[in-house]
Amino acid sequence: MRLRNSFLAMLGRNLSQAPQAVVERVRVAMAEALAEHCSTDHEELDRRIHYAIDIAELWYLRADLMTAIATSHHETRARSCMARITALFEGYQPGAATPSRLTPL
């Protein structure tokens, strides 16, 4: 992850511009979704969410979270949960052309 961030930073894109309050709000929502919808066998993902250094790392962890929830339940529930989490990234998602454009999973 750091190599990608370094490369994109060289291109003039700073992926960690989100205020710490936004990062924490997203981190808490992702951790709560993992705890609510998944069993304890996802400790590695929980650690990765907890130790993510910026909003970009959390953005790229959405796919792993979606997979974990879909594996524990079904894809419909996972998509619904991920839609709520993805909305928390509005204005801070890496690679978006405008603040209102969200990339769905």
Image (spheres, rainbow, N blue to C red):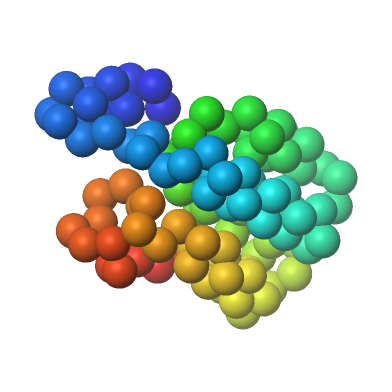
Q: Is residue 70 above or below residue 30?
A: below
Pick out the residue farthest to the left.
Answer: 11
Q: Quadrant of residue 60?
A: top left
Rendered location of residue 100, percent (x, y): 30, 69
Q: Is residue 48 above or below residue 70?
A: above
Looking at the rendered image, the quarter that the C terminus falls into is bottom left
Residue 54 or residue 40, whichever sits in front = 54
Whether residue 21 is visible, yes or no, is: yes
**Residue that appears at 39% across and 22% down:** 2
**Residue that appears at 40% across and 67% down:** 104
Left or right of residue 59, residue 4 in this image: left
Q: Quadrant of residue 45?
A: top right
Rendered location of residue 29, percent (x, y): 67, 56
Left or right of residue 68, residue 93 in this image: left
Q: Is residue 79 above or below residue 91?
A: below
**Residue that appears at 62% across and 51% down:** 25
Looking at the rendered image, the quarter that the N terminus falls into is top left
